[in-house]
Amino acid sequence: MYAGTAMLEKYQLFKHPLKNHVKERLDNLPSTLLKPVRTLKLWVKYEQLDIQAILEAIEIRHQLQQKRSSHVQKNLDFQAELEKLNQGKNSLKTLFSTKDGKVSRITELTRKIADGQKEVECLDAYLRLVILQISQAMIPYFKKDKALLYNDLLNTLARQNLANA
């Protein structure tokens, strides 16, 4: 030990035997600090998951609309072919058919049109249900919930920063 260091030891923060509690407190400081950045990261992750869920619901609505318009187009095509057959005109499918073949094709087209109309009605009801769920439940709840969560997050971050100060 150098001369005069013994006198200065009482002013040293970490080496003085009576000030070990300060060193221990400083060593434990990282574990006692609250982590506002981690809280913010988790909040952003949950927000992303919520937004993905809403986007998936909107994508399902879009798929239902496409499926509905596909069924409507098929029904229109079947209807046009049925009208041609009822007028006595031939199509590629009935060009070489017998009279019984044409009758069975007319019956088949009539059944397909009826089934297609039922399918379109079901898709309409399902689509209305999905649209109502998205517009009346999901989006308003999402807006309200996100405003409350955002305010809560700001309060939590402020409390954590104050606790860390």
Image (cartoon, rainbow, N blue to C red):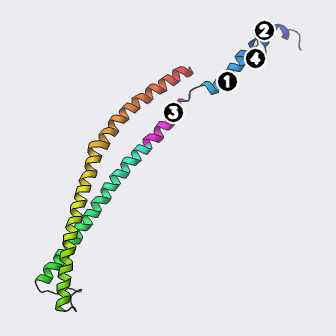
Identified at 44% across, 45% down, the residue is 49
Q: Nearer the viewer, mark 4 or mark 3?
A: 3
Q: Pointer 1: what residue?
A: 28
Report crowding for label 3: few under 14, some 14 to 19, many 20 or more residues within 10 A (C-alpha).
Answer: some
Q: In terms of sequence position, does the residue under pointer 2 or pointer 3 come before the other?
A: 2
Instruction: Say which amino acid is labelled 4.
Output: Phe
Horizontal placement of 71 versus 88: left or right?
right
User: Which residue is under mark 3?
Assistant: 39
Q: Give the mark nearest the N terminus, 2 or 1.
A: 2
Q: Nearer the viewer, residue 122 or 58?
A: 122
Task: Answer with mark 4 or mark 3, whichever residue precedes in sequence.
Answer: 4
User: How far is disc 1 from disc 3 in space, using C-alphas?
Assistant: 21 Å
Residue situated furthest left in the rendering = 87
Residue on which disc 4 sits: 14
- Mark 2 Cα shell of 10 Å, populated few (<14), some (14-19), many (≥20): some
The kind of residue on which mark 3 rests is Thr
Between residues 35 and 7, which one lies in front from this camera angle?
35
Magenta span covers which residues?
34-47
| Figure quadrant of residue 122 | bottom left
Quadrant containing the C terminus is top right
